Image (spheres, rainbow, N blue to C red):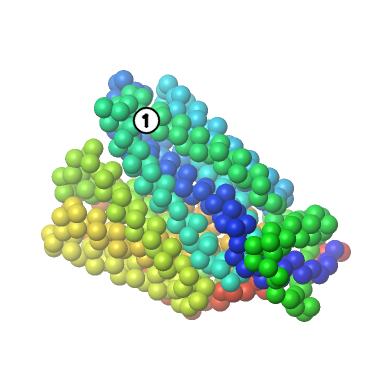
Amino acid sequence: MSRTHDLAHRLDRLPWSRWHWRVVLALGVAWVLDGLEVTLVGSVGAVLERADTLALTAVQVGWAGSLYLAGAILGALVFGRLTDRLGRKKLFMVTLAVYAVATLATAFSTSFAFFAVCRFVTGLGIGGEYAAINSAIDELIPARVRGRVNLAVNGSFWIGAALGAGSSLILLNPAVLGPVQGWRVGFAMGALLAMALVLVRRHVPESPRWLLLHGRDEEARRIVADIEAQVVAQHGPLPPLDPAARHERRDTVPTMREVLHVLLRRYRVRSGVALALMLAQAFFYNAIFFTYALVLTRFYGVPEYRVALYIFPFALGNVLGPWLLGPLFDRVGRRRMIALTYGLAGIGLAATGVAFVAGMLDARSQALCWSVVFFFASAAASSAYLTVSEVFPLEMRAMAIALFYAVGTGAGGFAAPLLFGWLIGSGDRGAVAAGYALGAGLVIVAGLLALRFGVDAEGRSLEDIAPSMTPRG
């Protein structure tokens, strides 16, 4: 059954307010948690090999990382589908709870089997967060600032990375807790942060757009009226409504066959661009980040216990990129900024590879080069998630995010660390630089595809970018 509504226009016309800040903080911290998890595991990997901790082998440490990634992919697919069916709020509460319980359980691990299961389940929660959070934020944030908000939220992963590096330096210090207990407290800290967020998220409403899709019109209108009342209390009267700004919506959830039809037939060009962006950024990021410590220790002789110090400038560049460049995605436009950030990231990595081969860099300058490269790459990677979350219809938004995340992470995420681990293991700087050139080429091509075939989504309502799927009945 098909009806029209003006709720999307009412949400998009709202000025930025304290209510929007609460939504962003309550939902956006999910990526801080992801960054904390990934960096913490990397920092304590060597500690977990000690006989007085879990006595893991290097292979088992690697398996734990792979299982976390596998859990994230499966979690995105399963929870993504459920997010479209059961609601944004219900799922972002469930996925956060799954993450919190699994991370807390990790702190009490006594064997590799228990640790591995905990990492897999933690990944399930984080993967589900990607689909539930991105769809919820896009549907609650006004169209004119959707780009910068989405990029800033996705870029907050690196705040978590810095927290993970910093906490490991402190907690593993023998003068504080030491290796035997410090790694356990690190995981427990992540769980406590997540549990606090559960309380904050209780006050974030369900997406009115999703409620309309499921025929819960009165509830949707009540939520929008409450949001408007809070904004009016802060900013005064709202701009008048445009009587013509109405959108059609459908009262049924699409089947997987319909979802695939939209992806492969109706929006096949958009799907191709989105896939290229996700694959390129996943390969680019995982190639550098998961072998960051190897390059520093193998080629520059940095002691393992000092590697975490080099995470801070790297994380700073990654945080500042989306925050400073994000507004330009709304002002200059999606296609131009995606092409610019992907292109500059690729050129920067290629130039770093040339300097690396020539022996022009030391550990500090290498870290500085990476920080500059990922200033642009972080904004580029965040824009890939933004693209996927806004160019497909509401009825399948969470599932689209999940599918592209799964394919991009599964292909680029698994291939890049394996390839670069082998290249670095060869000890040949030229081979490593060739890998950098491959990653650079992938992101440059992806950026050019976005420039040519991307969607001008800036400032437009989600319903205008991707109208409702053909109503039935």
Residue 74: quadrant of the picture: top right
Q: Position of residue 254 (x, y in %)?
A: 73, 58
State the residue at coordinates (65%, 50%).
204
Describe residue 358's horizontal placement relative to residue 246 as left or right: left
Circle 1 — which element?
Answer: helix
Q: Position of residue 432 (x, y in %)?
A: 24, 56
Name the amino acid type tagged 1. Answer: Trp
State the residue at coordinates (41%, 66%).
324
Q: Position of residue 278 (x, y in %)?
A: 47, 60
Q: Is residue 436 above or below residue 6?
A: above
**Of the pair 23 and 108, the residue shown nearer to us:** 23
Q: Which residue is mark 1?
A: 183
Q: Is residue 186 above or below residue 90?
A: above
**Of the pair 167 and 428, the residue shown nearer to us:** 167
Describe residue 300's horizontal placement relative to residue 472 as left or right: left
Residue 138: quadrant of the picture: bottom right
Q: Position of residue 149 (x, y in %)?
A: 53, 62
Instruction: Look at the image and tell me whether residue 190 can be seen.
Output: yes
State the residue at coordinates (16%, 49%).
300
Q: Assign the C terminus to one quadrant of the image.
A: bottom right
Q: Is residue 147 above or below residue 295?
A: below
Instruction: Look at the image and tell me whether residue 400 can be seen.
Output: no
Describe residue 305's horizontal placement relative to residue 409 as left or right: left
